[in-house]
Amino acid sequence: MTGTRITIDNVTKRYDRVEVIPGLSAQFEAGEFTVILGPSGCGKSTLLNMLAGLEEVTSGRLLFGAREVQNVPAKDRGCAMVFQNYALYPHMSVADNIGYSLKLAKVRKAERVERIAAVARIAGLEGYLDRRPSQLSGGQRQRVAIARAIVREPGVLLFDEPLSNLDAKLRNDMRIELSNLHKRIGATSVFVTHDQVEAMTLADRILILNEGQIEQFATPGEIYHRPRTTFVAEFIGAPAMNLLKARGEGGNLCLASGTPMTTVAHEGEVLAGVRPERIELSDAGLKAQVLYREDLGSHHILLVQLDSGEQMRLSTSQGGANADSSEVFLHIPPDAVHLFDPETQQRIN
Amino acid sequence: MIERTRTVNVVATGIMIAGILFILAPIVIAFLTATLSYEEFVSGGGIRLRVSDHFWENFAHVLFETRLPAQLWNSVVISLLVAFIKCAFAFTATFALVFYKSRLNTVIFAITIVTVMLPLELIVITTYQVVANVLMPINWLLGWTGLDALIERLTGSRPYLEYSLLDSYIGVAAPIATSSTSVFIYRQFFMSLPKDLPRAATMDGAGPIRFMIDILLPLSWTPLVATFMFWFIGGWTAYLWPLIAASTPDAQPAVVGLARLANTDPDRIPDVPMLMAGALFVSFIPVLLIGLMQRQIVRGLNLSEK
Ligand SMILES: Nc1ncnc2c1ncn2[C@@H]1O[C@H](COP(=O)(O)OP(=O)(O)OP(=O)(O)O)[C@@H](O)[C@H]1O
Ligand SMILES: [Mg+2]
């Protein structure tokens, strides 16, 4: 089985008067695992449903390989979907759930049984084939949903927040399973989530969507290390990146109050972003009061206030310097600073 | 919030017993009366609470000397038709309303509700006219388009189509079945189903009809059975319309036949004991059904539990 390359060419979507997606173009390579990430209501599900054929495209073109599919009915697009709430057929056994699409496609019984057994093995569902969905755990149900999706050997696999109904531990296990599964079957996968851990770990590339528009479409590393806009910068990473008003003056990056923060090559007004995990505690430097300390076990998150009034968050390893003090000195390495244009919110450095 | 104090329990039990007595009393009286002979009944001066031993006599009379057994069969067919028509139309209509969004949805739903608010009793004369000649609309259409005059000129006779459904099973059943109360029940049930279910079916390659038959129908089994029972009994006890639409005893359902037995001879005191035996005979099928299907009915109409 090989994946299908997906081309989204200037696609728009409007419901009555509301424009949900104002014009979006992107290309997902064959066999690539793309994660669509964005805040609630930004149009992730809408985009996915348009790929699936469950929603009509208002204008623009969708291509699977070289084939234009925006007017092709869902069942003829060669794609399958996994839903957040599993959407299994409650009155059918696991085997019938998995085999329903094959039955509708008039696949012979013997071949059907064989293929159901094969995907059940891949999904770890042997021995459960006779059960009803109500007799399965959440994780097993989601495995059935995945098995149902892959049994037709689709070129495109779509996932709409498939893991968000599972508990944290199961979610971690399923993530790894999904990743392995993807490597094994090689379908082009598009995965919608608003969990950034899922996005970072699963994706070949992450597409960050905001109000129906692409903020950035890049590898997880690129997104984390070189966010293209302040939106991406604040959206990725927990706790979120600190963004401060600053200006570059004679090689120094100064806060609004004039206090130098670190060195910089840029001149003029900027928004300076620093990730909490890149701020170091030292014996001298920027002086700050600790307002609040969250102990997460593995590390601490401090909310500090600079003398000039700005607040920042930083994370330190447990038992790091000044573990109990209410006054700390911050060191910000020059290469930890992301610079953004205050007008356009775009990255400059 | 359920309070479980002694007084509440006692009062509740009291009310329940009173309710049961209230409901059971007519049945008990009917049964007691059915055990009397005609002479005992007449000499006793009407209905009295005493037991006698003529029940089987009365029952045999009903079975072998009246048309009730045949009319019972009419009742079965008519009630099945009523229940089937109601459920089938409501099911398909609700399916379209819930799963297919259209601008006209509210209008369609409103029209559906109107049928609930127009009971048959209110439109019985027009209904009679239509059933007496179901081809009337075509006549009307011919007249309206002027086609009938044309045909008259060509053939020399003015066409008038006539087809009566009076005295037929469908003629009795169909007008009773034109009410869409079940749409409310099915709608509530359909909306409680996961909204991704039809989408999953679409992705699996199922069209709307396939989805309805393979997925929706089996899932809706409980509410379907419950409403079917409900409408079956409704059809069974319907009186006014069958009385009008079925003029011959051969076509009448048992409830109408029973009422007709009461006034065969206006100069004679009706044979009430035999009538009571007949009433028990006519009601045993619905009672049996309710008894057997109690659990299903409660489960089907209790919408909070899926
Ligand atoms: N059928 C519809 N009619 C009108 N507006 C809709 C419809 N479906 C979705 N929308 C709107 O489109 C926007 C995007 O919805 P969508 O479901 O794609 O968001 P999402 O990114 O998937 O959000 P979430 O993370 O909460 O699932 C929302 O503002 C929503 O209100
Ligand atoms: Mg969504």
Image (cartoon, rainbow, N blue to C red):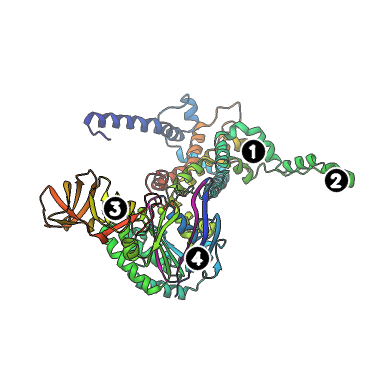
4 vs 3, front mark: 3
The answer to whether marks 1 and 3 mark residues whose Cβ atoms lie closer than 8 Å is: no
What amino acid is at disc 3?
Glu
Instruction: Work out whether residue A169 or residue A259 is closer to the camera in this orientation and state it.
Output: A259
What amino acid is at disc 2?
Ile
Q: Position of residue B257 (x, y in %)?
A: 58, 38
Crowding at dot 2, Cα within 10 Å, few <14 / some 14-19 / many 20+, comes out as some
Stretch of the chain drawn in magenta:
A18-40
Label 1 vs label 3: CA separation?
Answer: 99 Å
Q: Residue furthest front?
A: A250
Q: Is mark 4 within 8 Å of ligand 1?
A: no
Label 3 belongs to which residue?
A249
**Element marked by disc 3:** strand
**Element marked by disc 1:** helix
Label 2 belongs to which residue?
B151
Instruction: Work out whether residue A183 or residue A291 is closer to the camera in this orientation and state it.
Output: A291
Q: Are marks 4 and 3 on the same chain?
A: yes
Label 2 vs label 4: CA separation?
Answer: 63 Å
Q: Position of residue B288 (x, y in %)?
A: 44, 45
What amino acid is at disc 1?
Ala
1 vs 3, front mark: 3
Chain letter for the residue marked with disc 3 in the picture: A
* Left or right of A172, for residue A86: right
The answer to whether marks 1 and 4 mark residues whose Cβ atoms lie closer than 8 Å is: no
Label 1 belongs to which residue?
B245
Q: Quadrant of residue A319?
A: bottom left
Would residue A331 be counted in the magenta stretch?
no
Label 4 vs label 3: CA separation?
Answer: 45 Å
The dot on residue A7 is: 4
What amino acid is at disc 4?
Thr
